[in-house]
Image: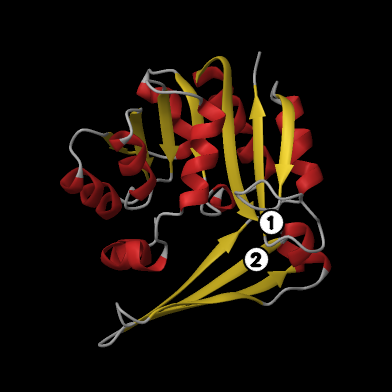
Amino acid sequence: MSKFYSEIAKYYDYIFPTGKAQIELIKEEVGSQPKDILDVACGSGGYSEQLDQTGYNVTAIDLDEQMVKSLKAKNPNIDTYVLNMLEIEQLNKTFDLIFCIGNSVVHLNNNDEIKQYLQACKRCLNPRGKVVVQVINYDRVLDQQVKSLPLIKNADAGIIFERYYNYIEDQHKIDFHTILKTEDNELENHVLLHPIKSSEFVQLLQESGFKNIQLYGSFKKDTYKPQESAPLIIVAEID
């Protein structure tokens, strides 16, 4: 895990505040509490906290130790672990819903690893359990050669977060270049992402044993439009 993520841990909630639409979609898909939920790549844990506070049994994992420490300090009631998303079976638990949002799954190296993650999810889900995944819409990014994502500003916290995309064709990777500007510091980082198109994701889900696969263009369940939607949200379930 990049040192960058540890460095931005204290700013994380200001850059990526917990969204109401995300919480509502997760609650709608998992059903009434108490249910067991796994938050994969939880960051500083805003979503885990809100779900815990509304009566769900939440487990949260992240690869960054500082993020996990932050969540543990805020809410010791949540089972929180430093863990790679490919290793969720080590938790020895089953869940009614597993969610991975924030464009996290594309930090995996290739489609094979994404399929490995999805297969691990299937084995960790209770009957009729579901996964929720959100990534950037890479149909649009690749087809339209998108070079940047919208600027994130938090005037109250004195933060500007710049995000740039550079597609490296011969590697089929995106160099994700970020610059976090605070009142007294500037943190810069590069990380390689694996861009996956919606059709590829659907195929991997089908091959991993998922059904009722739904694609949305927002957490409010707007219609997914490959050349227009900013994010891609996927909901799928098992038997």
| Residue matched to label 2 | 174
Residue 44 in the image: state x and y as whole percent: 32, 52
Looking at the image, is 142 positioned above or below residue 208? below
- Tell me, for residue 195, which label it has, or none: 1
Looking at the image, is 236 positioned above or below residue 69? above
On the rendered image, what quadrant is the N terminus found in?
bottom left
Q: Name the kind of residue labelled 1 in the image.
A: Pro
| Cβ–Cβ under 8 Å for marks 2 and 1 | yes
| Tag 2 secondary structure | strand
Q: Name the residue: 31% across, 34% down.
A: 52
Q: Nearer the viewer, residue 67 or 52?
A: 52
Q: Name the residue: 33% across, 47% down.
A: 45
Q: Nearer the viewer, residue 110 or 180?
A: 180
**How many numbered dots are placed on residues in this image?**
2
Looking at the image, is 42 positioned above or below residue 176? above
| Tag 1 secondary structure | loop
Earlier in the chain: of badge 2 and badge 1, it is: 2
Q: Name the residue: 58% across, 75% down.
A: 150
On the rendered image, what quadrant is the C terminus found in?
top right
Q: Name the residue: 30% across, 42% down.
A: 49
Q: Name the kind of residue labelled 2 in the image.
A: Ile
In the shown orientation, is residue 191 left or right of residue 174?
Answer: left
Residue 114 in the image: state x and y as whole percent: 62, 39
In the shown orientation, is residue 142 left or right of residue 37?
Answer: right
Q: Within 10 Å of the Cα at label 2, are there few (<14), some (14-19), or many (20+) other Cα atoms?
A: many
